[in-house]
Image (spheres, helix red, strand yellow):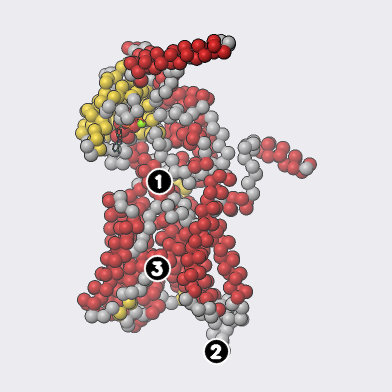
Amino acid sequence: MKSNESNQSAAAVSEPQDERLQKVSFWKKALNRPELGALAGTVLVLAFFIVVSSGTGMFSPSGIVNFLEVSAQLGIIATAAALLMIGGEFDLSIGSMIGLAGILIAIPAVEYGWPLWAAIILAFSCAALVGWINGNLVNKTGLPSFIVTLGFLFILRGLAIGISRLLTGRTQVGGVQDHIPGDWFAALFSGEVGTGLFAWMASQGWIATNFADNPMVTGIPVSIVWWLGLTAVATWILLCTPYGNWIFASGGDKNAARNSGVPVHRVKISLFMFTAFSATVFACIQVMDTGSADTIRGMLKELEAIIAVVIGGALLTGGYGSAIGAALGALIFGMVQMGIFYTGVNTDWFQVFLGVMLLVAVLFNNYMRKKAMEAK
Amino acid sequence: MSERTPMIEMCNVSKHFGSVIALSDISMKVCSGEVMCLLGDNGAGKSTLIKTLSGVHSPSHGEMYLDGKPVNFKSPAYALDAGIATVFQDLAMIPLMSITRNFFMGREPTVGWGPLKRIDWKYADRIAKQEMAKIGIDVRDPSQPVGTLSGGERQCVAIARAVYFGAKVLILDEPTSALGVKQASVVLRYIAKARADGLAVIFITHNVHHAFPVADAFTLLSRGGSLGTFRKAEITREEVLNMMAGGAELESLDAELSEFQRSDQQQKQATGDGGQPLSRASNA
Ligand SMILES: Nc1ncnc2c1ncn2[C@@H]1O[C@H](COP(=O)(O)OP(=O)(O)OP(=O)(O)O)[C@@H](O)[C@H]1O
Ligand SMILES: [Mg+2]
């Protein structure tokens, strides 16, 4: 009681504390962050699989890298989808863009002898164009992006199949791996990072090694680096830059944002271009990894990305969400997918689990947001 | 006064929305250091007029001049850059965003350079809090979402923002509609101060007690057209009141009110105590 009083007088001296404001603890503040639900979910799922999958190797170093890789691939597109959803729009054409970008990389490189870097640049240019068209259509027509990008879901998939059949007579193009060595640009999307470091750590006996004294994990797959990098950049943008403020504003109320001087149209176009970009990064990594492109790649990825973003606490109506939340959503996704594989549960159940997760996340977020809006 | 170049001027401006003619052939000018009060019934076109001035709508016909130079704002961002700040009737606030984020929306203060350029949150929070304090609202926490503020507090954020960013022209569309007596008087003082600082102020209100003390001139709109501009010297408070509501309507309201009063008194006399006379309501 006594210490309480002295606290109060100290506060009164330093800065007059508003009598209408309760002392808000750190935890109460944390409760208002959008990613809280995803964080709780991550801990739960992690705990669940640590218990259930014990002894299966899911949490061995290579097991961890395995599920992180799954999370990373989804996380790359989820980050962009999160920014776009916070900006008030959806992109349902992400999955088809992955398929098309793969074809655009593989065909010029394999069939026409382009250097890989040129093919990759071609894919990125086409992605930028697709994003630009998506954004402009949404801006100019005022139609929901749901409809516009649904159109592009079919257009891009059709283009991928059509172009591939026309030029090669097939829907799969292999042999990309022969072009990777020595290509400076392809190196950004293939292989592992920090192999030297891991080898050194193994030689010091700090990490597990196999029978040949090679480390179990030889490096960090490049997809994970992309994932973390994009998440960090997106978080920086959202929390620290004017452009981030414009994203929140555009998604919150685009008229109010425009009337306050926010270039809403430019923001939306750039966000659509970013989702197409992220889809192409995904495609690059996948093509380098498998050495082939296939027109059906990326199917349903747009929905998986939306699930990750929503689990991460973003509002479907825009104006609220976080990139870290989307990363956690992708992490949950990867853990569940690989966890079901490791624990030997029939993988048929994966989708059931996913749907339930989505519903729980939405209900939880809805509840938390109401709490946040009244309890502040 | 009329020889000076007007700070902002509209010449024969019309605005059509499809077949709706929201403004027809409006001319108006406001000099620096002058307060123009826009009057008119609901739906007269006041908001449409100021939205045209602030770049939300582009005029269908006619020209606009800022400081003597013709302007054609493609969006409100251009008008803001040119020094025209507006409090819109709907306030243009995002409920889920914090007070600070709303205050500086579109005009974020930054530090650093290149890719490390970032919003100066400390400075932004301090300014937002300080500007709100000036208007008489003690902000508890500038990171509070605007959606959790009361209606009047929200209006104050919008006003403080416009006053902070308005350099040449300040436009206020019914800024006092939700305000308490104290805050409304602060807003009126703001308007007087903006006038003293040489801004051109355009002020829309339905409240004659707010309009009359600060305005230098009144422009009356009706059904999208202008009924003329009157200098304050040419007009009395009663005439303004009549213009705002339409004289005939007030008279009939008066008659109705005294009718109520009479029947009230009759009832009260019947029950045996004296009734209080109703005072005339002059305020929409
Ligand atoms: N975007 C629009 N599309 C079609 N009609 C519009 C639009 N904006 C305004 N109008 C019409 O123009 C007329 C004038 O509207 P305005 O909002 O300017 O009225 P106001 O004078 O501000 O009224 P109030 O006092 O109620 O705010 C109204 O009849 C309205 O229906
Ligand atoms: Mg209006």
- Residue that appears at 49% across and 61% down: A359
Upstream in sequence: badge 1 or badge 2: 2
- As drawn, the label of residue A212 is 2
Upstream in sequence: badge 1 or badge 3: 1
- Residue B149 x %, y %: 52, 38
Please identify the quarter of the rendering in which residue B67 is found. top left
Q: Amino acid at mark 1?
A: Asp
A23 vs A197: above or below: above
- Residue B218 x %, y %: 33, 20
Protein chain holding label 2: A
Front position in the image: A349 or A278: A349
Looking at the rendering, the quadrant in which ligand 2 lies is top left
- Between label 2 and label 3, give the one nearer the viewer: 3
Q: Tag 1's secondary structure?
A: loop
Front position in the image: B257 or A62: B257
- Residue that appears at 51% across and 44% down: B145
Crowding near the residue tagged with mark 2, few <14, some 14–19, many ≥20 C-alpha atoms within 10 Å = few
Q: Amino acid at mark 2?
A: Ala
CA–CA distance in space, label 1 to label 2 = 60 Å
Front position in the image: A267 or B167: A267
Protein chain holding label 3: A
